[in-house]
Image (cartoon, rainbow, N blue to C red):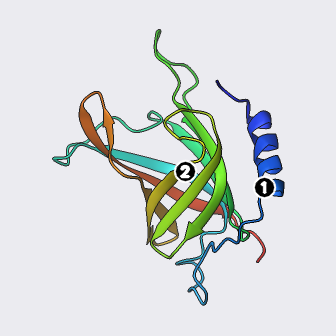
């Protein structure tokens, strides 16, 4: 089942209102800009490699686009897609969106998913991402994923476009 963006946003808002879990989005006393991941981030690059380090096609295509918002209260919502105007005949547009409560310990971002557009991101499951910073950019590294028999190692590179008030 595919959800529209407005349906997903409504579902996320309802889930957020219903949840009362205490969330720790950043470590106490975290250095601003390093461990503070709150705000809205724009995806600016993606990288995919096989186990030997050889380059693979970019996740979400050559014009991948995405936004992720992480609140100080520990809620997140991500929307990612192939941003090309047109695709080759028979090709499908890659798209993923999900939301949930998250925790961040300064190195690992874990989101407990409560709404998702695709089966690979299971509702009730955890999305785990290693986090590192390269200057002002945040790099998220999910666990390797098997695609057509190949283990794919991916990185998603983000730039903050809007901080959230503390």
Between marks 2 and 1 in the image, the one whose residue lies nearer the viewer: 1
Query: Picture coordinates of residue 121 (x, y %)?
Result: 53, 41
Residue 16, label in figure: 1
Is residue 27 placed above or below 113 in the rendered structure? below
Q: Nearer the viewer, residue 151 or 38?
A: 151
Instruction: Name the residue at 57% across, 78% down.
Output: 33
The location of residue 156, given as percent across then percent down, is 45, 52
158 or 148: which is nearer to us?
148
Q: Quadrant of the C terminus?
A: bottom right
Element carrying mark 1: helix
Q: Which residue is mark 2?
A: 43
* Residue at x 20%, y 48% (from the top left corner): 53
Outermost residue on the left side: it is 52
At 53% from the left edge and 24% from the top edge, which residue is drawn? Answer: 93
Image-quadrant location for residue 41: bottom right
- Element under disc 2: strand
Does residue 60 show up?
yes
């Amino acid at each position: 089942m595919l959800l529209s963006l407005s349906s997903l946003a409504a579902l996320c808002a309802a889930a957020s209102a219903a949840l009362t879990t205490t969330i720790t989005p950043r470590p106490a006393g975290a250095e601003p800009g390093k461990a503070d991941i709150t705000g809205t981030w724009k995806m600016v690059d993606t990288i995919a490699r096989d186990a030997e380090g050889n380059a693979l096609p970019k996740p979400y295509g050559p014009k991948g686009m995405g936004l992720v918002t992480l609140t100080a209260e520990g809620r997140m919502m991500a929307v990612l897609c192939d941003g090309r105007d047109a695709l080759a005949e028979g090709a499908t547009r890659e798209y993923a969106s999900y939301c949930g409560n998250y925790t961040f310990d300064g190195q690992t971002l874990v989101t407990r998913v409560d709404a998702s557009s695709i089966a690979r991101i299971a509702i009730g499951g955890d999305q785990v991402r290693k986090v590192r910073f390269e200057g002002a950019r945040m790099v998220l590294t999910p666990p390797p994923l098997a695609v057509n028999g190949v283990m794919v190692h991916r990185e998603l590179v983000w730039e903050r476009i809007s901080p959230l008030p503390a």
